């Protein structure tokens, strides 16, 4: 069974944090030529606005998704407000190879260095979209080495839909 990625609102120490900006959305990814764009449903995991949970966290910080227990993180939450725009801006850009996994390297307002968006693509049988882009994690990584193999974003999406490996280009 697929878990729904609707985050709603979370009340922490009397303050309500709206997480609806992390609800799924549809992304148009150009295919090139005369072909229609890929329609990709983008979903966000709790790792985009949480950190590792430990005994010093209060119970109201606990966020669980499936078997994954995490703690709400104000810093990651603030950064997550820019996730949709960062992904939409990446559509005509490139993805980087981070230990064999595709990542988008974005810049966010008031954040020095790279904001890393790690994702996976899988084909779907939905009549409404061609694939699901699952954003597994997003976090500030100011010292990420940008001198790694890359691929155009649409190429990474097409490879995921085809169940193929991404053809990385070495820098």
Image (spheres, grey):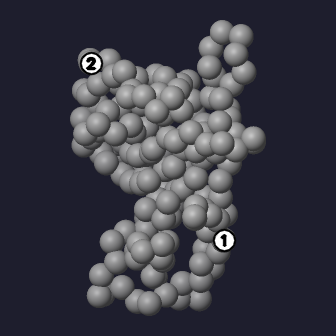
Residue 112 at x, y = what percent? 37, 45
Quarter of the image for residue 95 reads: top left
Q: Which residue is mark 1?
A: 8
Q: CA distance from mark 2 to mark 1?
A: 41 Å
Mark 1 lies on a secondary structure that is loop
Instruction: Pick the residue in front: 113 or 99.
Output: 99
The image shows residue 73, relative to residue 162, as above or below, that is: below
Mark 2 lies on a secondary structure that is loop
Query: What residue lies at 48% left-to-right and 77% top-to-bottom?
Result: 63
Quarter of the image for residue 123 reads: top right
Residue 151 at x, y = what percent? 40, 23
Q: Which residue is mark 2?
A: 170
Query: What residue lies at 41% left-to-right and 46% top-to-bottom?
Result: 118
The image shows residue 6, relative to residue 56, as above or below, that is: above
**Furthest-top residue in this view:** 33
Residue 70 at x, y = what percent? 40, 74
């Amino acid at each position: 069974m697929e878990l729904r990625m609707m985050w709603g609102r979370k009340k922490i120490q009397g303050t309500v944090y709206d997480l609806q900006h992390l609800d799924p959305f549809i992304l148009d990814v150009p295919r090139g030529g005369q072909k229609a764009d890929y329609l990709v449903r983008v979903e966000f995991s709790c790792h985009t606005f949480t950190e590792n949970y430990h005994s010093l966290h209060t119970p109201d910080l606990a966020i669980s998704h499936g078997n994954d227990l995490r703690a709400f993180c104000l810093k990651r939450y603030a950064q997550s407000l820019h996730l949709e725009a960062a992904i939409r801006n990446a559509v005509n850009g490139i993805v980087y190879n981070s230990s064999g996994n595709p990542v988008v390297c974005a810049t966010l307002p008031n954040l020095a260095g790279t904001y890393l968006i790690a994702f996976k693509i899988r084909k779907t049988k939905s009549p409404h979209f061609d694939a699901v882009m699952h954003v597994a994690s997003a976090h500030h990584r100011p010292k990420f080495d940008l001198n790694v193999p890359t691929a155009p974003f649409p190429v990474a999406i097409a490879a995921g839909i085809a169940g193929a490996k991404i053809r990385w280009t070495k820098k």
